[in-house]
Image: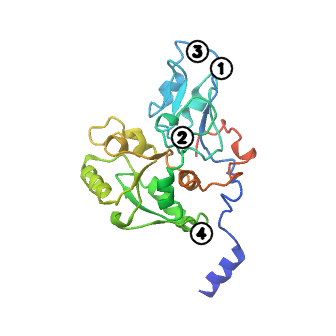
Amino acid sequence: MLTWLINRAAQGQRTLAYPAEPANMPDTYLGRPTVHPTGTACPPDCQECLASCPTDAITLQPDISLDLGRCVFCSECVQSCPEQIFKLSNDFRTASTSREGLKLRNDEAPVVEKLQESMLRIFGRSMRIRHVSAGDCGGCKDEFNAMSNIVFDLSRFGIGVVASPRHADMLLVSGPIPENMRVALEKCYLALPQPRLVVALGACAISGGPFAGSAFCHNGVESILPVDMYIPGCPPHPLTVLDGFLRLLDRLPDGASPSREGTADRPERSTR
């Protein structure tokens, strides 16, 4: 025990300064994709990016766009596109309160609209989350669990996780929602007191991800419940989740965006 305390004291302050200070992601981090149209339509016979995308996130007609809600950040489109239209940035901001807002056509981050003033008065200083892992692989669950560690320390914002939906303000759902989980998810949602929020965490919960169109899974939470915010990723980084929560609660101070260095394009990497 003494050795543990000595080692911990030697580590010093480990909690991130974000959002009081900008967060800089490591160079190896593959963040929000960006779309850089060349100004002309893709050649009719050019299908490399479409063929490379495992989740059909790319659309070429009537204009070039990438559905962040389907994207699994595999960077295959970056490697395969001869026009170099798609790139991966170091920006962790991918959350959006609009499903349509996840369809990227440029290099701007999606928008998270803050809650209405009446709901901000209720959730602004304290919010409790009930997380339902609806058939996820464990990635989204583990990244969300990491938000309770000493580095991210979600509780410092008055946000915590509860075991019962009757004590929760928000229902956070991850996974493609197998049919066997549908009734349980609906009951959990109805058990939350009103007003209540629903957040889809990860590509599977937003669109079905790689399981979209499966006869055994639903194509995202939205096909079952109303969704207030979407947090893309496979899985989303804890900072992505935190950024989305703070924007929703209108608690992100000026200057908390990633620095210029933190948003540099990283098109050359093809693995996480």
Mark 3 or mark 4, earlier in chain: 3
Q: Mark 1 packing: few (<14 Cα in 10 Å), some, or many (20+)?
A: few
Task: Name the residue beneath numbered marker 4.
Answer: 150
Residue that protrudes farthest toward the right in the picture = 261
| x and y percentages locating residue 36 in the rendered image | 64, 27
Q: Mark 4 packing: few (<14 Cα in 10 Å), some, or many (20+)?
A: few
Is 108 drawn above or below residue 191 in the view shown?
A: above
Q: Quadrant of the N terminus?
A: bottom right
Name which residue lies at 47% across and 61% down: 122
Q: Mark 3 packing: few (<14 Cα in 10 Å), some, or many (20+)?
A: few
Marks 4/2: CA–CA distance: 27 Å
Residue 129 in which image quadrant? bottom left
What amino acid type is highlighted by mark number 3? Ala
Which disc number belongs to residue 73? 2
Is 87 drawn above or below residue 206 in the view shown?
A: above
Is 97 drawn above or below residue 167 in the view shown?
A: above
- Specify whether 71 is left or right of 86: left
Of badges 3 and 2, nearer the viewer stands 3
Which disc number belongs to residue 41? 3
Is 167 drawn above or below residue 48 in the view shown?
A: below
Of badges 4 and 2, nearer the viewer stands 4
| x and y percentages locating residue 144 in the rendered image | 49, 58
What amino acid type is highlighted by mark number 1? Thr
What amino acid type is highlighted by mark number 4? Ile
| x and y percentages locating residue 19 in the rendered image | 66, 57
Callout 2–callout 1 Cβ contact below 8 Å: no
Secondary structure beneath label 2: loop
Callout 1–callout 3 Cβ contact below 8 Å: no
- Specify whether 16 is left or right of 54: right
Which disc number belongs to residue 38? 1
> Which of 13 and 26 lies nearest the eye of the viewer?
13
